[in-house]
Image: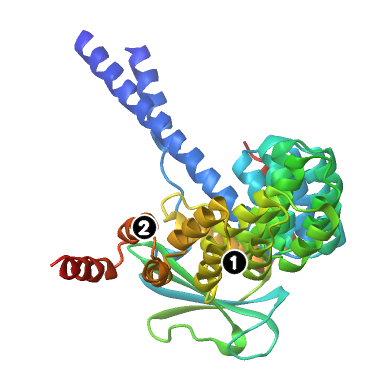
Amino acid sequence: MKNILKLATAFALILFSTAAFAQASDTEEQDSLKMAAMEALITAPPERALPIVDKVLASDSSIELKERALFILSQMDTPESQARLVAYASDSQGELQEEAIRMIGIGGDREALAGLSDVYTSGDAKVRQAVLEAYLIADDTDAVFEIATNASNEEEFSEAVQMLGVMGAHEQLRELRNRAGLSESLVEAYMISGDEITLRELALDGSNPEVQLQAIEALGVVGGDDVGQTLVDLYQASADEDVKEAALQGLLISGEDEAVLELYRNSSDSAEKRELLELLVVMGSDDVWDIIDSALEGAE
Amino acid sequence: MRALKVMFLGLFILALLNSPSTASTFSEADGWYKWSVDSPVNMGSSCCGNMSGELAIYVRSSNGGPVRIRAYNANCDKGPEENVTDLGAMSLAQSDALLLEIVQATNVDMDVREDALLWLVLTGSDETFEYVDRLLSSR
């Protein structure tokens, strides 16, 4: 009798653990179905989908499901859904707020994007970054330009102009130079945006030595057809050691070994020749071996 | 001895509760099942340019259960032609019931259940949205 009881107890334990495993698997399946149902709502008329999406967002559903709900909201092309999205971007917090902001960027609705301006002003650093990213996604350079123009401190200005750089907003960045004056972050933004024209202009302008040096190196990063010649001209024309050094750095960064070789051949100063040869070695130039051969032949 | 009987009865009920739900309509024979339904949603069709709310829904059954779902605009039905059990024209409620059977069948692959859910929402009856609402509100 005791053995039968033991057997029954063991059987019960196995069955209960199987049931617990099945329950966990059911929960997983249920979550997958919920996700699929939410995604399927993208095909539903907005007037049918909106109340359901609203309900999920107001519930204690998982963050993943709510994020998906925000995406569905962003894809409904109605004033109600966009207003709802802006409300979530303003009033919710943390991950969900950032996701709502991102979804406004993905949706690209002009009014909703304009609504992000207030969200930016009242938000913390994370929210401000999320708003800038939303504008990046929507390619709304004017909105980022407005933020840069109205920035209340250098950090905000710097973040905004960097974003303009990433967006390749040449016109807005050039306009900022007239309005806000030059700064390190602005030159960096010219570099990020690949604005070779403005950088060349700044590199040749010695009125602000710090900006000039930064622009020369940035020109090397941006590269381009005439960069080698511009940097060689700068190197040769300037008596300022810092400018010369920055020009060499620019040549190194842009990989213009032909231009460095030209400088080497034109130089009659042995210390300078040594420095240029070292630079060519660092650049891995094939011409270095020809130079060494010529030097050895000359020595012989 | 009585306690033992009660215990075995309990275990039997538990085992029954754990048995999977099946999509029995598609378990009779392997092959394709087809039906048509008028959807209240107007669907564009990239293949024929016409707009029509009539859908032809195909479910492939293998080893006694659905393994694939396809749906076509009835104007350009490119579904399989052989080994098809035609279930005929159905009302929206009947079609929903068949798709829901697949959605809720726990022994069917999740991808197929999710496909069924998509078509369920796409054909869009009131009952469908009530179901989706309940599903999303459930814990």
User: Residue drawn 48% across and 83% down?
Assistant: B79
Residue designated by label 1: B119
> How would you rate the neighbour count of disc 1 (Cα within 10 Å): few for under 14, some for 14-19, many for 20 or more?
many
Please report, as a chain letter, where disc 1 is located.
Answer: B
Q: Position of residue B10 (x, y in %)?
A: 41, 24
- Based on the displayed image, in which of its 4 quarters is residue A191 positioned? bottom right
Q: Quadrant of the C terminus of chain A?
A: bottom left
Q: Secondary structure at mark 2?
A: helix
- Based on the displayed image, in which of its 4 quarters is residue A106 positioned? bottom right
Q: In the image, what residue type sits under mark 2? A: Leu
User: Residue drawn 77% across and 47% down?
Assistant: A54
Q: Position of residue A35 (x, y in %)?
A: 58, 50
Q: Position of residue A69 (x, y in %)?
A: 68, 50
User: Residue drawn 50% across and 77% down?
Assistant: B34
Q: In the image, what residue type sits under mark 1? A: Trp
Residue A85 in view of the camera? yes
Residue designated by label 2: A279
In the image, A43 versus A203, the foreground residue is: A203
In the image, A126 versus A67, the foreground residue is: A126
Residue A184, relative to residue A13: is it above or below? below
